[in-house]
Amino acid sequence: MSTTNALRTIDMIRRAGKTADAYRTAQHAVREAHDEHGAAQAQLHHRRDPMPAMGGTGRASPLLAAVQEHRKAEQKVRKAEARLQRAAAAVQAHRPALNRYPTEHNRHRATTVLLDRLADHPVDLIRAADLVIIQTSSGKDSLVAMHRTVAAAKAAGCLHKVRVMHCDLGSEWPGVPDLARRQAEHYGIPFLLVTPDGGFLGMVENRLMWPDAKRRLCTSTLKRDPTGPVITTWVRELGLDRQAIVLNVLGVRGAESASRALKARLALDTRTTSANRLVLTWNIIHGLSEQQIWHDIASNGLEYHPIYDTGLERLSCVYCVLAGPDWLILATRVCFALELPHPKTFAELEQRIGHSFKQNFTLNSIVAAARILDALDGPITWRRGDAVRRHLGPAAADQYLALTR
């Protein structure tokens, strides 16, 4: 099956699944409407039963209310039955897919198999796409994801399809947005900087709570939600008279966590996909190890953020809600060395909202521990290339430094 046909089949299965869901929902609505209609009819008959004279017009109001309720119920039945008819017509239109993949399990399995096969052929995948969006944090994984996507796009002769987007949360290490721009410019790719209103600290102040592993609003609210309107705009600019194929590239690796290990290399983004765009999330470096990431960076002389040289392994917010105490203490000591205001800013916010940064400890305790270590060992120091040196050895670091002079 060709790449284009595979993508069409994936969308056909998606539409068939939505149609089947709509049909079941419509059936349920009809049953509910008929039940309400029956209850209203019984109430109306009850109000019309002969009763002893009450004097005056005491029964007029209850009877009128029952008539109105009966009419509403009749109208609801008509609407529900019309909805069911439309859903039934849609089912007939998607009958081939529903016959071939009759259950939700089979539809999911068929989609997964097709997507996994497409992920094996990145060059063909980019050729079939209309738009390739790289969402970058400017961290090491995003950097290698960008490098590999560009390599595939060049091989496909489709570099013009590629664009880069970075969401600036306002709580990251200095230079992150500028580095993201330079990394994109290195490949000659259009770059867009998205700045969510209020940023990370504004969101925390408004909610009076820090995010946590179960409520990662820093990802959903500040990164994922702002990308939807951008994709809508870029797809509209393509001016296509058919559904656009959009590849959304992320620097997600399975080795980072148990939850990320379960993610697929290529997945259908059902939240963003619509009638005019089929959006696929492409975790292009999902199978790479950290060693392989640094090998790609070193051998290609790619510019990475100097914060990795300090011993920090992730380029996230200065204080990441998913980080453990050792990581946070090191981040605080780096802030001291760079004379950054983040420890004071974050600790004051923690006190102001009355909610601990982490369940088991406060940021004030982290800052205090960092001060003690600085007093005992002195301020931390690092050299350019230390990240490569730590992961690949001195020779690789020397070679990298020679490439990036």
Image: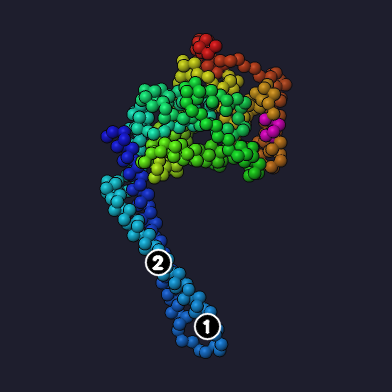
Instruction: Give the left or right position of residue 28, taking residue 390 as reference.
Output: left
Q: CA distance from mark 2 to mark 1?
A: 27 Å
Is the residue under label 1 in contact with that under label 2 (CB below 8 Å)?
no
Q: Which sits in the foreground, 360 or 321?
A: 321
Query: What segment carries the magenta color?
Result: 342-347
Mark 2: secondary structure: helix
- Element carrying mark 1: loop
Instruction: Tell me which numbered mark, 2 or 1, is placed earlier along the sequence.
Output: 1
Q: Which mark is residue 230?
A: none
Tell me which residue sits at (53%, 23%) in the image: 182
Identify residue for label 1: 59
Quadrant for residue 7, please give it: top left
Q: Is residue 108 above or below residue 398?
A: below
Q: Which amino acid type corresponds to the residue marked 1 in the rendered image? A: Arg
| Residue sitting at x 35%, y 35% | 115
Q: Residue furthest right?
A: 375
The C terminus appears in which quarter of the rendering?
Answer: top right
